[in-house]
Image (tube, helix red, strand yellow):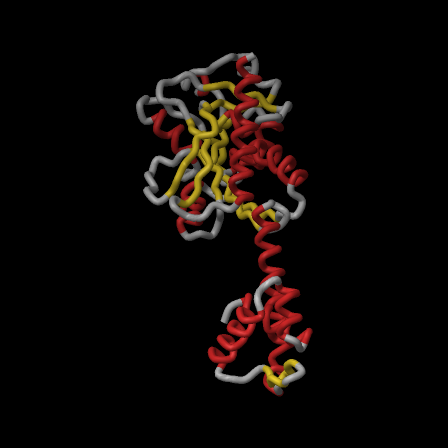
Amino acid sequence: MELRQLRYFIKVAERLNVSEAAKDLCITQSTLSQQIRQLENELGVQLFDRTSRGVELTEIGIEMLPYAAKTVQDAEVCIDHISDIQNLKAGMLRVGVSYSFGSMLATVLAKFMKLYPGVKLDIHYKKTDHLMERLCNRQIDLALAFKPERVYPNLETKTLFKRKLSAIVNRYHPLANKKTVSLKDLVPFDMVLVTHGMQARDLFEVLLSKTDIKYHVRAVLNTVPAILQLVRDTQFVTVLSEETIRGDQSLVSIPIDVPGNVMEGCVHWLRGSYMKSSAKELVRLLTEHNSLHEMVNEI
């Protein structure tokens, strides 16, 4: 059974005349009659009684008509909805985000939501390894996170920017006016760090493993906003990507000058899977946003 055949059936039922229905449909009478017979043969029933004056719906035809009309209507609604999704007028986009991307994402999402008010967003903040798992399990459409140490062969990755791990302090901290700091420069200060398993902490531990430096870590938290508030209110130092505080005038980011200090900010998606139009557009806006940011930094 095809939608075309159901449309033909509805038109004949409406006109009760095959010749007139064929004219309305812009097809030949023989083609229309053939399609109706094929539909009847497939269903194993007779939908019309043929008379010299035209056709009449049989009891089964009368019973089938509202279902056929609803089926065609639902199909048309579905087609319209698909078109809306393709044209970014509807749909749902699920995005996973690591904590360091919050500020950048908020800026881009504001633009995205203004451009596409019909697209709903479902945002999840997780550690990078959890985001990669969610992508692999098709629980999210995109992930924004620094490039993980582990290789995920079934994921595609696009680098948006490269940043250094930085010491983050408030504007009144003794280190605030420095252009860069060494790992030794941080020794005199109490530190508050993110938990192991978060990209910034893992890279920091890798850099430290090449030295004999020890720090006084006063607190370890798994929430970046709480850490940043502690840094604002105290003389604590934390170590995060400089991207984490983009746009925050109350804090200062000081790159740590040490070999191997680089973090690649990336957008990730499932390799070979269908990418929604909304996902493609968000990737475009993220790329555009970061390209502009890099240009401003170079001026």
Instruction: Identify the residue at image location x=32%, y=27%.
Output: 209
151 is higher (above) or lower (below) than 54: above
Viewer-nearest residue: 41 or 69: 41
Viewer-nearest residue: 211 or 89: 89
253 is higher (above) or lower (below) than 76: above
Left or right of 10 in this view: 155: left
Q: Position of residue 67 (x, y in %)?
A: 61, 75
User: Residue furthest toward the front?
Assistant: 52
Viewer-nearest residue: 275 or 93: 275
Viewer-nearest residue: 206 or 216: 206
92 is higher (above) or lower (below) than 29: above
Left or right of 92 in this view: 215: left
Q: Position of residue 64 (x, y in %)?
A: 60, 79
Quarter of the image where one finds residue 299: top right
Residue 62 makes an appearance in the image: no
Residue 181 makes an appearance in the image: yes
Q: Position of residue 172 (x, y in %)?
A: 61, 18
Instruction: Identify the residue at image location x=45%, y=48%.
Output: 274
Left or right of 246 in this view: 270: left
Q: Position of residue 211 (x, y in %)?
A: 32, 21
